[in-house]
């Protein structure tokens, strides 16, 4: 692998950095180094970097804004590409409809805010959701009863054979916090297209303000990775299974529980916050502690929402 990495670094003509600390590129501020790290600012660059890595037999990981992932202490082998492809266009179809075409590195909250203020509705729920368009598609991000799949039309991808393809929503296998891309690791989301509908800008802004205020009251402000666990599926015969993951963790008496520098938030129990000096190993230990306590207390096996990398 070392020779392959060296060859790839040469092929990337000095654009890649070796042993880049990924803690600086994740919202939780923990994680080890990437063997090679490069930033893609255009889709052509993103495609080129992926093709170059594959040509040299080097694994590739696409990094968005670093939310919803936990990078292990030993870091990530191969090439990490930070996706900074953030261009988008709005094609107005008529007075009621428009098509948003957004590159996968664009910040989801920024786009939601800009379009809502222009009177284009459909993404207001995302105003407080950290992450990029690509990450949101991969994980079918959602909040306030809505999700990315609701008004998505389709995506453009680079497939495992290095071909660019267009995929309609019907082929994306969306589920709760999941999509085909959770399983098809060789596919890279390049762009996503959404149908937007016309609404009164003040009504859009009012909804965003409502969602923002709710998040301000119910979620911590310290560095975190977002929601750690998925909410358990509902089961009418077992009322606790219809509870959110945060409520189960809270009822297990785990708010404020700490391992090293990581702590179960006092504000929202499904968030772990970095109190300073936290390591990925701290997070992994706290995850297992919380899982075990909830399993013993309620008989519920919590499933991770975050992705563990490395």
Image: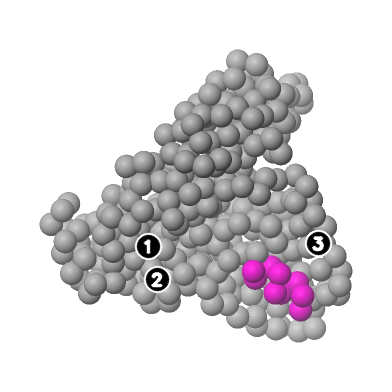
Q: Is residue 43 left or right of residue 211?
A: left
Q: Nearer the viewer, residue 269 or 154?
A: 269
Question: Which quadrant, please, contains the C terminus?
Answer: top left
Density class for disc 3 (Cα within 10 Å; few <14, some 14-19, many ≥20) is: some
The span picked out in magenta is 110-118
Q: Is residue 213 left or right of residue 167?
A: right
Q: Secondary structure at mark 3?
A: helix
Give the distance between the C-alpha atoms of the residues marked 2 and 3, in whole angstroms: 33 Å
The answer to whether residue 5 of the structure is visible from this angle is yes
Q: Would residue 211 be counted in the magenta stretch?
A: no
Residue to which mark 2 is pinned: 40
Q: Name, please, the residue furthest toward the front.
A: 276
Q: Residue at x 57, y 26 (%)?
A: 290
Whether tag 2 and tag 1 are in contact, CB under 8 A, the answer is yes
Q: Residue at x 81, y 68 (%)?
A: 205
Give the distance between the C-alpha atoms of the residues marked 2 and 1, in whole angstroms: 7 Å
Residue to which mark 3 is pinned: 209
Q: Which mark is residue 81?
A: 1
Q: Is residue 230 left or right of residue 93?
A: left
Q: Which mark is residue 35?
A: none
Where residue 179 appears, as percent x and y from the top left, is: 54, 51
Counting residues from the N terminus, which is met first, the one under dot 2 or under dot 3?
2
Counting residues from the N terminus, which is met first, the one under dot 2 or under dot 1?
2
Where residue 182 appears, as percent x and y from the top left, is: 48, 48
Q: Secondary structure at mark 2?
A: strand
Q: Residue at x 75, y 72 (%)?
A: 116
Above or below for 131 versus 229: below
On the image, which quarter does residue 136 sit in?
Answer: bottom right
Q: Would residue 113 be counted in the magenta stretch?
A: yes
């Amino acid at each position: 692998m070392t020779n392959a990495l060296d060859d790839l670094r040469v092929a990337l003509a000095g654009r890649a950095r070796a042993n880049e600390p990924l803690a600086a590129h994740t919202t939780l501020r923990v994680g080890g180094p990437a063997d090679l790290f490069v930033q893609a600012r255009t889709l052509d660059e993103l495609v080129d970097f992926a093709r170059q890595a594959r040509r040299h037999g080097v694994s590739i990981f696409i990094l968005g804004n670093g939310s919803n992932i936990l990078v292990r202490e030993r870091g990530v082998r191969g090439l990490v590409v930070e996706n900074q492809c953030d261009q988008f266009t709005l094609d107005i179809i008529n007075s009621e409809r428009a098509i948003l075409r957004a590159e996968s590195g664009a910040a989801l909250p920024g786009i939601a805010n800009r379009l809502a203020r222009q009177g284009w509705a459909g993404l207001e729920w995302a105003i407080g959701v950290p992450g990029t368009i690509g990450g949101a598609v991969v994980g079918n991000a959602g909040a306030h009863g809505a999700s990315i799949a609701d008004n998505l039309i389709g995506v453009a991808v680079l497939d495992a054979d290095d071909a660019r393809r267009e995929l309609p929503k019907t082929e994306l296998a969306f589920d709760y916090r999941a999509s085909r891309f959770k399983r098809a690791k060789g596919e890279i989301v390049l762009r996503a297209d959404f149908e937007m509908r016309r609404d009164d800008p003040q009504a859009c802004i009012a909804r965003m303000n409502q969602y923002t205020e709710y998040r301000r009251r119910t979620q911590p402000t310290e560095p975190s990775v977002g929601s750690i666990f998925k909410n358990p599926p509902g089961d009418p015969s077992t009322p606790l299974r219809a509870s959110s993951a945060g409520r189960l963790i809270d009822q297990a008496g785990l708010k404020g529980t700490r391992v090293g520098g990581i702590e179960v938030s006092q504000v929202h129990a499904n968030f772990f916050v970095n109190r300073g000096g936290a390591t990925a190993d701290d997070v992994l230990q706290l995850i297992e502690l919380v899982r075990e306590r909830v399993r013993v207390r309620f008989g519920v096996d919590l499933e991770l929402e975050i992705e563990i990398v490395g």
